[in-house]
């Protein structure tokens, strides 16, 4: 056994990592090469098993025709992170971070240190980031920031610049969705690494649309008309669910619906593909609430009330997705971040029965799918001795291998093209390919929720 271990270590199949500062104690781990060989063996065994049993995959979930690269599970770091008392994370409570938390022991092995994390809802997370910035020394090494927050956080100097380029693997930011990178880039510097991206789209029950003979709605008037038909047909109790709860939830709805009418909520320069987000610094952009698109968005939301559940004015992101997953509505505005509620749950009436469309347009005639998501960043008041460890942790937690691990453990919100092209990931849900296609066609845009101060 010792001779076999020595041979595999010299061949690069085993990584030997020191456990103590003296170097007398160490642990052994499979290298990325050994993991790749193991993954290849598993793939061959799966194909053999399918041939022997005559098994075929669900046609809706096997759309990959060509042989594409299968991404391996993450390998351990060659050196443990130099972080006394372990890695301290501040996260958002969503499926990706819940998957990360479920894999805590595995990531502790990968990083070589313990992990202590706190997961909060969106508003509580924002307040905690602000409170933490006022401490003399940050309580956290790495924080998760909603993409639109970066303009304000950078302007207030609450984040350290972060180099996305991984010199060891040759990876750079071209593998990430471009609009996600635009959100974390300020003044030609990168302040975060995307860990998840999500598109807000219109989701609809394909069986209902087929019975009623409807095509996916392209205009807001179509949404009203189809919602009324759904209710009168009795195929669903209500037409559509959306974020109506006071505060951040309704504010989010209004800005995305206004964008679907062709205008962001702040004054932005029009570009070739939507709107550009300039480097504002500390200046707050001009609000555009007197624009005709703002009035049209408000009137459309008032019309939606008549075809929405009676509790719509208390609905948030989770409530609307749950209402759709349970069959209470036939249509919903929903982030793909929460698509696991119906895409991965066979008990849902919408399981393998959901169609996706960009936001139906109002005045503009141009479809848009607002980009959402989170990126990992380093607080500017971090203890300087912990910066290197925090950078390496972010690199590991946002790698291709880690991103795939989140998806196969319940998240459907990868920000990387290479991960979404992985056959095993693509087979998880058709939504993976839909979002990828929207990004490549320029429909997935960050300007509806622009990363600007205020």
Image (spheres, rainbow, N blue to C red):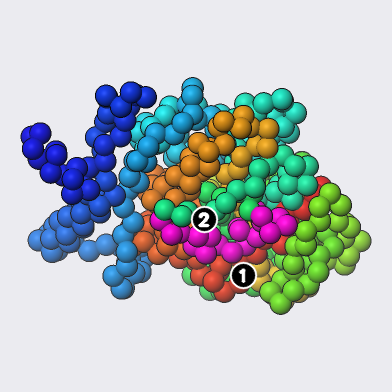
Instruction: Quote the CA–CA distance across marks 1 and 2.
Output: 26 Å
Q: Position of residue 423 (x, y in %)?
A: 33, 62
Magenta region includes residue 342: no
Residue numbers of the magenta segment: 169-189
Residue at the extreme front: 22
Any mark on residue 423, and which? none
How crowded is the residue under tag 1: few (<14 C-alpha within 10 Å), some, or many (20+)?
many
How crowded is the residue under tag 2: few (<14 C-alpha within 10 Å), some, or many (20+)?
some
Q: Position of residue 7 (x, y in %)?
A: 12, 44
Horizontal side of 114 relative to 274 (left or right) equals left
Task: List the residue tagged with mark 2.
Answer: 165
Residue 195 visible, this orientation: yes
Task: Say which element carries label 2.
Answer: loop
Horizontal side of 205 relative to 259 (left or right) equals left
| Residue for point 87% across, 60% down | 288
The front one of 242 and 364 is 364
Task: List the residue tagged with mark 1.
Answer: 443
| Residue for point 78% across, 62% down | 278
| Residue for point 16% across, 59% down | 44
Task: Say which element carries label 1.
Answer: loop
For the N terminus, the quadrant is top left
Q: Quadrant of residue 352?
A: bottom left
């Amino acid at each position: 056994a010792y001779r076999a271990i020595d041979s595999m270590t010299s061949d690069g199949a085993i990584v030997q990592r020191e456990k103590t500062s003296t170097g007398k104690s160490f642990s052994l781990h499979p290298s990325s090469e050994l993991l790749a060989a193991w993954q290849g063996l598993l793939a061959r065994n799966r194909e053999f098993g399918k041939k022997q049993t005559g098994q075929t995959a669900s046609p809706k979930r096997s759309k990959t025709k060509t042989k594409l690269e299968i991404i391996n599970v993450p390998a351990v770091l060659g050196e443990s992170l130099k972080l006394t008392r372990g890695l301290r994370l501040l996260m958002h409570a969503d499926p990706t971070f819940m998957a990360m938390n479920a894999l805590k022991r595995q990531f502790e092995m990968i990083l070589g240190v313990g992990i202590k994390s706190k997961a909060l809802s969106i508003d509580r997370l924002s307040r905690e980031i602000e409170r933490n910035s006022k401490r003399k020394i940050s309580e956290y090494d790495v924080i998760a920031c909603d993409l639109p927050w970066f303009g304000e956080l950078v302007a207030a100097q609450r984040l350290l610049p972060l180099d996305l380029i991984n010199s060891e693997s040759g990876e750079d930011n071209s593998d990430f969705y471009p609009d996600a990178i635009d959100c974390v880039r300020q003044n030609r510097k990168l302040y975060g690494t995307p860990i998840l991206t999500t598109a807000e789209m219109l989701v609809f029950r394909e069986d209902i649309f087929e019975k009623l003979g409807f095509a996916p709605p392209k205009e807001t008037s179509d949404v009203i008309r189809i919602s009324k038909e759904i209710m009168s047909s009795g195929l669903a109790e209500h037409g559509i669910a959306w974020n109506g709860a006071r505060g951040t939830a309704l504010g989010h709805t209004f800005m995305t619906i206004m964008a679907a009418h062709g205008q962001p909520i702040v004054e932005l320069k029009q570009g070739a593909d939507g709107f550009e987000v300039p480097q504002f610094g500390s200046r707050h952009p001009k609000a555009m609430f007197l624009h005709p698109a703002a009035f049209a968005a408000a009137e459309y939301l008032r019309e939606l009330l008549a075809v929405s559940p009676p509790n719509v004015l208390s609905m948030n992101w989770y409530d609307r997705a749950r209402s759709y997953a349970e069959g209470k509505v036939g249509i919903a505005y929903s982030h793909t971040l929460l698509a696991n509620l119906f895409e991965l749950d066979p008990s849902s009436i919408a399981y393998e029965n959901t169609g996706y469309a960009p936001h139906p347009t109002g005045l503009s005639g141009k479809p848009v799918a607002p980009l959402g998501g989170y990126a990992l960043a380093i607080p500017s008041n971090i203890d300087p001795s912990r910066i290197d460890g925090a950078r390496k942790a972010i690199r590991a937690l946002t790698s291709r291998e880690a991103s795939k691990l989140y998806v196969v453990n319940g998240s459907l919100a990868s920000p990387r093209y290479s991960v979404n092209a992985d056959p095993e990931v693509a087979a998880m849900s058709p939504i993976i390919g839909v979002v990828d296609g929207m990004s490549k066609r320029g429909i997935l845009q960050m300007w509806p929720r622009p990363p600007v101060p205020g």
